Image (cartoon, helix red, strand yellow):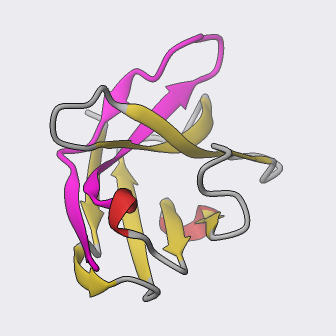
Amino acid sequence: QVQLVESGGGLVQAGGSLRLSCVTSGRTFRLYAMAWFRQAPGMERAFVARITWSDGRTNYADSVKGRFTVSRDNAKNTVYLQMNSLKPEDTAVYYCARQQEGSSRYDYWGQGTQVTVSS
């Protein structure tokens, strides 16, 4: 059974940094990509960043380009989100998600971790 467990959220002042981690259990066979999404209060869940598992290609939302970096450690089945120069508008619950080969959607989701940026 596939599970994703996020960690690393917390409270930080504007301009600060946090690193989120997401460990995926279960087989990584046919794992195509891992991604981060976030959901602020009253808002829809939004894409943040994505990394392909085999070759590490990355994509970012415009709002985080230059500030956030997504990376992975295949040996540890872990994806990271390094968040620098945090802004109050980055406050949200952050979720990691897993996309399988041949799927156009994210099939598995973590429970989320809260990130709060104070001004």
- 22 with respect to 80 (left or right): left
The part of the image, by quadrant, that contains residue 9 is: bottom left
Percent x, y for residue 28?
52, 42
- Residue 25: x percent and y percent? 34, 50
| Residue 24 percent location from the top left of the image | 38, 51
> Which segment is the magenta one?
91-119
Q: Nearer the viewer, residue 109 or 37?
A: 37
Q: Is residue 14 above or below residue 75?
A: below
**Residue at x-position 49% and y-position 59%:** 77
106 w.r.t. 62: above or below: above
Q: Quadrant of the C terminus?
A: bottom left
Residue that protrudes farthest toward the front in the picture: 119
Image-based side of 33 in relation to 109, left or right? right
Q: Residue at x 29, y 75 (%)?
A: 8
* Count of residue discs: 0
Quadrant where the N terminus sits is top left
Q: Nearer the viewer, residue 6 or 64?
A: 64
Quadrant assignment, res 61: top right
Residue 70 vs residue 33, the one in the foreground: 70
Q: Residue at x 78, y 53 (%)?
A: 56
